[in-house]
Amino acid sequence: MIVTLDLASEVPIYQQIRDRVVEAIAAGDLREGSPLPSTRQLGVDLGINFHTVNKAYDLLRHEGLLRLNRKSGAVVVRDPASGPPGPGFVGDWEARLRTLLAEAVAQGVRGPEALEHCRSVLTSFKPQPETNHEGTQ
């Protein structure tokens, strides 16, 4: 797994790691069952403290994307083919989306331009099989 960090960014390092893992899952580069490096190994690979990696992994665990186990390590437990999200996810996601879009509007990005950016980002992820509302193909 390749994670690139911007050490000069205002975004905390643990958040950057979390974001790159989520993007890799969305892009199909990490799938359900994929192992991630141990916190210590990824810390060494990135030249950062393993506690920072642990914080990122713990966020992903809390979000239902990773399983953390002393024996098996960090393993992806959810990907786009896993079916519909759990209860409460969409409401929380919409609240975050609202804030992101509000930032864009506050900076002068117009609605149609924001929608085009959203489309562009969504199409950058690998196509997922179409599912019905019950989560089956």
Image (cartoon, rainbow, N blue to C red):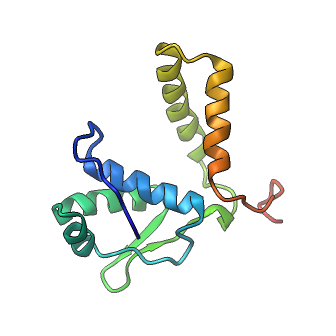
Task: Kindly tell me whether residue 88 is visible in this rendering.
Answer: no
- Residue extending farthest bottom: 71
Q: Is residue 97 left or right of residue 42?
A: right
Query: Dividing the picture into quarters, in which one does residue 61 lie?
Result: bottom left
Tag count: 0
Q: Relative to residue 19, is residue 41 depicted above or below?
A: below
| Relative depth, front residue between 97 and 69 | 97
Locate the N terminus and report the quarter of the image it occupies.
bottom left
Q: Position of residue 12 (x, y in %)?
A: 26, 44
Q: Position of residue 136 (x, y in %)?
A: 81, 65
Q: Position of residue 38 (x, y in %)?
A: 29, 75
Residue at the spot 80% in from the left edge and 59% down from the top edge: 131
Q: Relative to residue 135, is residue 72 depicted above or below?
A: below
Residue at the spot 59% in from the left edge and 65% down from the top edge: 28
Task: Kindly tell me whether residue 116 is visible in this rendering.
Answer: yes
Q: Is residue 137 left or right of residue 69?
A: right
Q: Is residue 23 left or right of residue 9?
A: right
Query: Dividing the picture into quarters, in which one does residue 2 lie?
Result: bottom left
Q: Is residue 95 left or right of residue 69?
A: right
Q: Position of residue 40 (x, y in %)?
A: 21, 73
Residue at the spot 47% in from the left edge and 22% down from the top edge: 103
Locate the C terminus and report the quarter of the image it occupies.
bottom right
Residue at the spot 24% in from the left edge and 70% down from the top edge: 45
| Relative depth, front residue between 15 and 61 | 15
